[in-house]
Image (tube, rainbow, N blue to C red):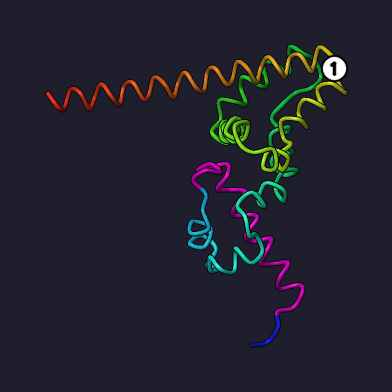
Amino acid sequence: MAKRSRIDTEITIKLILDEAFEQILTIGFENMSYTSLSNATGISRTGISHHFPRKADFLSCLDSRISARFCEGLDFSSVQLLESSWRHFISQDHAKAVLKLFFSLCASSQQIQGRFNTVNDIRYKALMRLGDEGGFCIDRLIGQSAVTMFSAQTEEAVAALNLIKARAC
């Protein structure tokens, strides 16, 4: 078998990363798999794992792209505009997926956490543009988003349990 050219390899890696990026934002990092990437790209799971031996490797390669996408939806011109743009932006599924990824990584190992800096990038941008008040604002918004997201999950779980109980009776 002939060795692939460097350009072919770069095209393959870009195709894999583009699909991984879309899957992280649509189905979430936890649902993205080598199989789902293979099905979407036509590249074998072995071929994908050759370039990305660990799933966490995708975070290293996509972190700046995820950060840029997240920051695009935020207005850093004032604390008030940052808050209102955050609330609007976070209602979108891809923004929720990024925050869900961040929250799930908080419970992961330091090695994996170190590969995902999107929230740190947003906080840094707020600090640089708005000073300490911007950093505090991001901290507060992240906390409020966590409570909102986990409350919604709890409500969904309770509703599902109630449905199961109702069907059992």
Residue 94 placement (x, y as % from top left):
57, 36
Which of the 4 image quadrants contains residue 67?
top right
Residue 79, quarter of the rendered image: top right
Residue 76, above or below 7 = above
Out of 95 and 105, give the one closest to the viewer. 105
Q: Residues within 10 Å of mark 1 (few under 14, many from 20)?
A: some
Tell me the magenta residue range.
4-31
Foreground of the two, 98 or 57: 57
Q: Is residue 125 magenta?
A: no
Q: Main secondary structure of the magenta part?
A: helix
Left or right of residue 125: residue 113: left
Q: Viewed as shown, does residue 75 lie left or right of 143?
A: right
Instruction: Name above or below for residue 137 compared with residue 104.
Output: above
The reply, left or right, for residue 110 in relation to residue 40 is right
Residue to which mark 1 is pinned? 130
- Give the residue drawn at x 48%, y 59%: 35
Image quarter (top left, top right, bottom left or bottom right) of the C terminus: top left
Q: Secondary structure at mark 1?
A: helix
| Residue 58, image x, y percentages | 65, 51
